[in-house]
Amino acid sequence: HGLFTSLRCELRHKGVHVMIVCPGFIRTNLQTRALGCDGKIATHKQTRVGPEDTPENVAKQIVNGILKKKSILILTFMGKLGYLISRLFPLLYEYIMTHKFKKEL
């Protein structure tokens, strides 16, 4: 988050807008080609936090965020909750995510 804040400050005077986008899980073909820790295509069910969104809906929300010049765009309830926890309790957030995604790590 801090890196993008610095970038935003450095480029603002040049008319460049920087927006962080946290889309959550998007329904794409990437899930069918994701690699496991052995470098081969993962065959286990992949862990998700919250429902998947469509690429079209995510694109619409990103365009709206650009038009409103948002500095950060978090698209899902679980994403917003996770962001809040990560900012208030970073170690708790790391523990929860590590535990949740243990199979993939």
Image: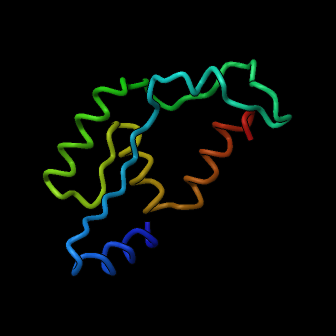
Q: How many marks?
A: 0
Quadrant for the C terminus, please: top right
Q: Using the image, determine if residue 80 lies above or below residue 90.
A: above
- Colouring chosen for the image of the structure: rainbow
Which residue does the image show at 23% across and 78% down from the upper left? 14
Kindly give the residue lying farthest to the front in the view shown: 14
Which residue does the image show at 29% across and 35% down from the upper left? 59
Q: Is residue 57 left or right of residue 46?
A: left
Q: Is residue 86 left or right of residue 70?
A: right
The quadrant in which residue 96 appears is: top right
Which residue does the image show at 72% across and 35% down from the upper left? 104
User: Residue 95 in the image: x percent, y percent?
Assistant: 64, 50
User: Residue 66 in the image: x percent, y percent?
Assistant: 21, 51
The quadrant in which residue 78 appears is: top left
Which residue does the image show at 30% across and 50% down from the upper left? 73
Q: Is residue 29 left or right of residue 81?
A: right
User: Residue 5 in the image: x percent, y percent?
Assistant: 36, 72
User: Residue 60 in the image: x percent, y percent?
Assistant: 23, 34
Quadrant for the N terminus, please: bottom left
Q: Is residue 58 left or right of residue 86?
A: left
Q: Using the image, determine if residue 97 lies above or below residue 33.
A: below
Q: Using the image, determine if residue 6 lies above or below residue 4.
A: below
Is 105 in front, or is 55? 55
Kindly give the residue lying farthest to the left in the view shown: 68
